[in-house]
Image (spheres, rainbow, N blue to C red):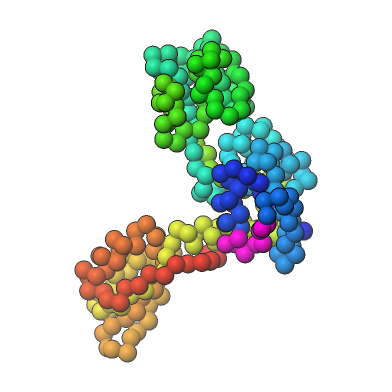
Amino acid sequence: MLRIAIPNKGSLSGPASAMLHEAGYQQRKESKELVLVDPDNEVEFFYLRPRDIAIYVSSGRLDIGITGRDLLLDSGANAEEILPLGFARSTFRYATKPGTAAGVEGFGGMTVATSYEGIVAKHLADNGVDASVVHLDGAVETAIELGVAQVVADVVETGTSLRNAGLEVVGEPIMTSEAVVIRRTGAGANEPKVQQFLRRLQGVLVARTYVMMDYDCRAEHLERAVALTPGLESPTVSPLHNEGWVAVRAMVPAKEAQRIMDDLYELGARAILTTAIHACRL
């Protein structure tokens, strides 16, 4: 039975469970549940603190985990990313009071406050900067006002909370993060159950990214229409009862669907429909 770690709370928890549900796995109904067995799929889910998941997976006690790339790298655990999941995206950056420094190269001799000590210490060392790192949990932006540090490093989305604290983002991003599937380093991902799990999640990712498009067009316009809707390998083309017309079906990127429909209509295509894809295997 495959043993999988899932975030029990925070921004990773809900989207992770939703993706697993779309992939056909049972998920807990109560937030107090710590373990869930899905006998039909031969999977056992363990709901753990997101920061602890990489440690559990690296120990070999659990086969796979879903956590944030930032948490994986910060942990220093013997685990590696095997599949990005595209949600809980964030950017990790430095911030300080205006005029303090233009970037990381100016942090020498300063103290940096952060909840991600491992990531920051490595980034400073990689840039040859001799600075101290102090670990704080929670809202690190108050560290500068209280004199604990001269610089903070944290996840930045809109930057509003930093500006409200009188701080500005400086330098290039430290890293970008998102939810990822992790595996113990060197364990590989070739086991049949692991491969099945990854295929299901990849199917959800594709289903969220594409829609199925159907339309009718004149045979003489087919090549131009297919150029607009090439599909993944090739579109399906079938003759219609009315001579000279064909029906075309192809997967198209969801974010481009409206533009493609407009272009097809201008080309003379009609009965243009799009439908959601709930699952797939490529």
Question: Which residue lies at the image location 62% right of the left edge and 23% below the top edge?
Answer: 135
| Residue 199 visible in image | no
Q: x, y (%) of residue 266? A: 21, 68
Q: Residue furthest top?
A: 109
State the extent of the magenta-drawn residues as a range.
21-29
Give yes or no for residue 121 being in the magenta stretch. Answer: no
Q: Is residue 89 above or below residue 27?
A: above
Q: Is residue 63 above or below residue 132?
A: below
Question: Which residue lies at the image location 54% right of the left edge and 19% below the top edge?
Answer: 143
Question: Which residue lies at the image location 46% right of the left edge and 16% below the top edge?
Answer: 105
Question: Which residue lies at the image location 72% right of the left edge and 52% below the top edge?
Answer: 33
Q: Is residue 263 left or right of residue 75?
A: left
Q: Is residue 41 above or below residue 269?
A: above
Give yes or no for residue 26 being in the magenta stretch. Answer: yes
Q: In this view, does 100 lie to the left or right of 245?
A: right
Depth order, front residue of 183/26: 26
- Count of labels shown? 0
Examine the residues drawn in magenta and state their main secondary structure: loop
Depth order, front residue of 109/8: 8
| Residue 150 visible in image | yes
Q: x, y (%) of residue 146? A: 53, 15
Q: Is residue 94 above or below residue 265?
A: above
Q: x, y (%) of residue 58? A: 73, 40
Q: In which quarter of the image is the N terminus?
A: bottom right
